[in-house]
Image: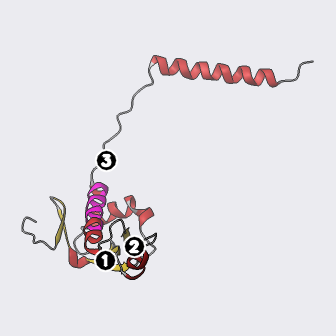
Amino acid sequence: MNAYNNDDIYINDELLIPQSELQFRFSTSSGPGGQHANRAETRVTLLFDLLQSPSLSETQRGLLRRRLDNRLDRHGVLQLHEQSSRSQHQNRALVINRFQKLIAAALQPRKKRKPTRPGRAARERRLEEKRRHSEKKKRRRRQW
């Protein structure tokens, strides 16, 4: 997927998501700001339908679904909000950037853990803690 235009969002070498797959909602931001904040719809909500996206392979879809499960609604839609700027245009760019980083990080392969043994100092600390705990319990026992 080398050829892409400005409407495509580059995630990594294997994935480009066209902006046409993203939906945007605009609303008024929370917090102070007076009349501007009360009238201008500068808060941007990005919606991405993970389950229906034609850009994702089944492998990518499964991986994203597992890793972003806590961020998806019950219909499999990812929602990201941005309201840090007073400009709707800037908030839109910021939320697209966050979306790009989030998807790229979720698709990043996880490193395998190399099993290691605890070192001597760690074993001694554990045994010392066990001894202290045992002494504490002994002190609480009834003395006859």
The quarter of the picture where residue 126 lies is top right
Residues shaded magenta = 95-106
- Residue 49, magenta (yes or no): no
Q: Is residue 59 visible?
A: no
Quadrant, the N terminus: bottom left
- Residue 103, magenta (yes or no): yes
Q: CA distance from mark 2 to mark 1?
A: 8 Å
Could you classify mark 2 by the number of other residues whose Cα lies within 10 Å: few (under 14), some (14-19), or many (20 or more)? some
> Would you name the residue on which mark 3 appears?
110
Which of disc 3 and disc 2 is earlier in sequence?
Answer: 2
The mark found on residue 76 in the picture is 2
Amino acid carrying mark 3 in the image: Arg
> Would you name the residue on which mark 1 appears?
52
Where disc 1 sits, the SS reads loop
Q: State the residue at coordinates (38%, 69%).
A: 81
x, y (%) of residue 48? 32, 73
